């Protein structure tokens, strides 16, 4: 599950942080106050909150304040949940509580492969080492990114920490561009029991290059 506040990030090269297919899917909802993306490994559902005089292109209105887009099966499931007043993936959303107010946020179960191109595939390998991961991005003079990998045991968290340190060391050796040097200098990596925390600052261009 991921959330984006389009009005906060408009004009801030926000597409750099999202896979191109997701950026294209979000484009009709630029006027929304909040856009949620739910992905189950095969189907993507988009839920947009705002005031809609008409359905955004490719979407249907559930209410004048809620628009849905995605596969027919995903839309049917979301419509049924709304009618029954049931929350989908309640446990996963509970894990997202610390990050839901950030400009861009996400919570991901371990083992789910995200549709990320290029180097983004490394993210899937790291997610496989955690029970779930939260991520967030906030803008000021640069982009502040935070990732928390929640593992089942301290031992599995140690393996995740070691894998991350190896990738960071490899990146420092392989990339000499000034913007990447600044990124690597800003990295904070620490482990607290079964949780691994990763923090860094980067330009949108550097984030985009990392995911290629």
Image (cartoon, helix red, strand yellow):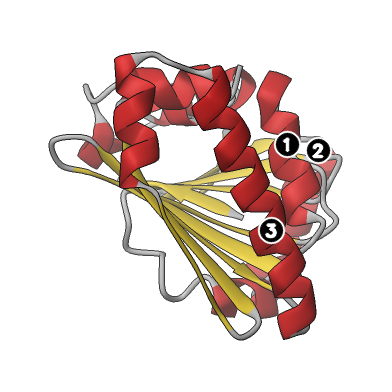
| 171, above or below 205, in the image | below
Residue under pointer 2: 72
| 28, above or below 165, in the image | above
Mark number displayed over residue 69: none
Mark closer to the chain start, 1 or 3? 1
Q: How far apart are marks 1 and 3 (CA)?
A: 14 Å
Mark closer to the chain start, 2 or 1? 2
Element assignment for label 3? helix
| Apparent side of residue 9 relative to residue 166 in the rendered image (left or right) | left
The quadrant the C terminus occupies is top right
Q: How far apart are marks 2 and 1 (CA)?
A: 30 Å
| Apparent side of residue 19 relative to residue 121 in the rendered image (left or right) | left
Q: Residues within 10 Å of mark 2 (few under 14, many from 20)?
A: few
How far from the left and from the top, in percent, is residue 183?
35, 34
Element assignment for label 2? helix
Residue under pointer 3: 162
Residue at 37 percent across and 17 percent down: it is 205
The one of 149 and 38 positioned closer to us in this rendering: 149
The quadrant the N terminus occupies is bottom right
The one of 35 and 153 positioned closer to us in this rendering: 153
Residue under pointer 1: 122
Q: How crowded is mark 1: few (under 14 residues within 10 Å), some or many (20 or more)?
A: few
């Amino acid at each position: 599950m991921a959330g984006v506040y389009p009005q906060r990030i408009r004009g801030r090269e926000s597409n750099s942080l999202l896979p191109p297919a997701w950026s294209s899917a979000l484009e009709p909802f630029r006027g929304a106050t909040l856009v949620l993306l739910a992905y189950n490994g095969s189907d993507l559902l988009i839920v947009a909150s705002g005031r809609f005089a008409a359905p955004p292109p490719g979407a249907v209105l559930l209410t004048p304040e809620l628009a849905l887009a995605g596969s027919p099966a995903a839309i049917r499931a979301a419509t049924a949940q709304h009618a029954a007043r049931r929350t989908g993936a309640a446990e996963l959303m509970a894990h997202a509580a610390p990050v839901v107010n950030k400009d861009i946020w996400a919570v991901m179960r371990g083992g789910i492969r995200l549709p990320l191109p290029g180097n983004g595939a490394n993210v899937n390998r790291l997610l496989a080492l955690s029970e779930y991961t939260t991520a967030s991005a906030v803008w000021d003079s640069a982009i502040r990114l935070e990732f928390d990998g929640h593992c089942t045991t301290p031992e599995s968290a140690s393996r995740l920490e070691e894998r991350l340190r190896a990738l960071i060391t490899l990146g420092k050796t392989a990339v000499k561009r000034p913007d990447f040097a600044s990124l690597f200098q800003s990295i904070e990596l620490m482990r607290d029991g079964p949780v691994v925390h990763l923090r860094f600052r980067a330009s949108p261009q550097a984030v985009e290059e990392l995911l290629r």
